[in-house]
Amino acid sequence: MSTRLWNSLYQWLEIVQFRLPPPTCVLCQRRGQPLRDLCQPCQQSLPALNQPCPGCALPLPPGTGAALCGQCQQGRTRVHTTVAACRYAEPVSALITRFKYQRQLAAGRVLTSLLLDRIHAHYRGHNLPQLLLPVPLHPQRLRERGYNQSLLIARDLSQALRIPLATGLLQRHRRTSPQQGLSARERRHNLRNAFALSQTWTSNHYQCVALVDDVVTTMSTINEIVSVLQRGGERPPEIHLWCLARAWLDQDGQARPL
């Protein structure tokens, strides 16, 4: 299915799923909150990020009072700030699976609405980024899946925040192996030279750009994209990261709940 055809289909599915029927909780099937398919008790039970690092959103140790985690202090994270809706744990991980692989758009829209809440709180009194860039899929994987979940998240955020969305600027021109099961070092090697920018990109046009993704684990994908975005130009933009969930990597290379 072409990207244009999917975009049209998505708009109709959005109307059918979210505008016509009353909100229904995606977790317990009870009546949801106004304009949100999630009831208040289920929302309160979701795994929250307590005292996240402003740089990468990993939880800071209690009572440390540190402004940034150790990895961010050492410069291992290339983004300026990260906003995540939730911790990657049940039932958020199940909702992401349903959204990403089972075409259950309601699950993704609920998590995106929670991310929007966090964005409003994070940027209160501060300027929002000037451009949204969804993390792209390789064209072959996009054809297999039928849609890019990061693009759907970014489109909703763009409409809600009135921030321009660039859909073809960042491209994944090399198909990589799945990241699941790879160590952090293997993930970095796997993503090397996987992304490219269209020739229309000029970093001087933007002071701040937000990358949008579903789950962030080791920052390997994000760091590789940031290195591409900041090549050339006299004033590389400040890069922010917005994601549905923040995870960590276990010894087997699997995304681990925080």
Image (tube, rainbow, N blue to C red):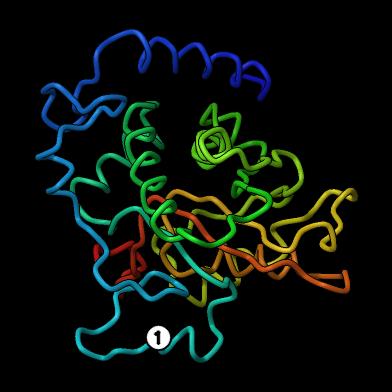
Residue that badge 1 annotates: 67
Side of 258 where 192 appears, left or right? right
Q: Residue at x 85, y 53 (%)?
A: 201
Residue 224 in the image: x percent, y percent? 64, 67
At a point 60% along the width and 54% down the height, the residue shown is 176
Outermost residue on the front side: it is: 125
Residue located at (60% from left, 46% from top): 134
Between 78 and 127, the residue placed more toward the observer is 127
Q: Is residue 15 left or right of residue 234?
A: left
The amino acid sitting under disc 1 is: Ala
Q: Secondary structure at mark 1?
A: loop
Residue 169 percent across, percent down from the top left: 76, 46
159 sits left or right of 175 in the view: left
Mark 1 nearby-residue class (10 Å; few <14, some 14–19, many ≥20): few
User: Which image quarter: residue 250?
Assistant: bottom left
When asked about the image quadrant of residue 105, the answer is top left
Quarter of the figure with the N terminus: top right
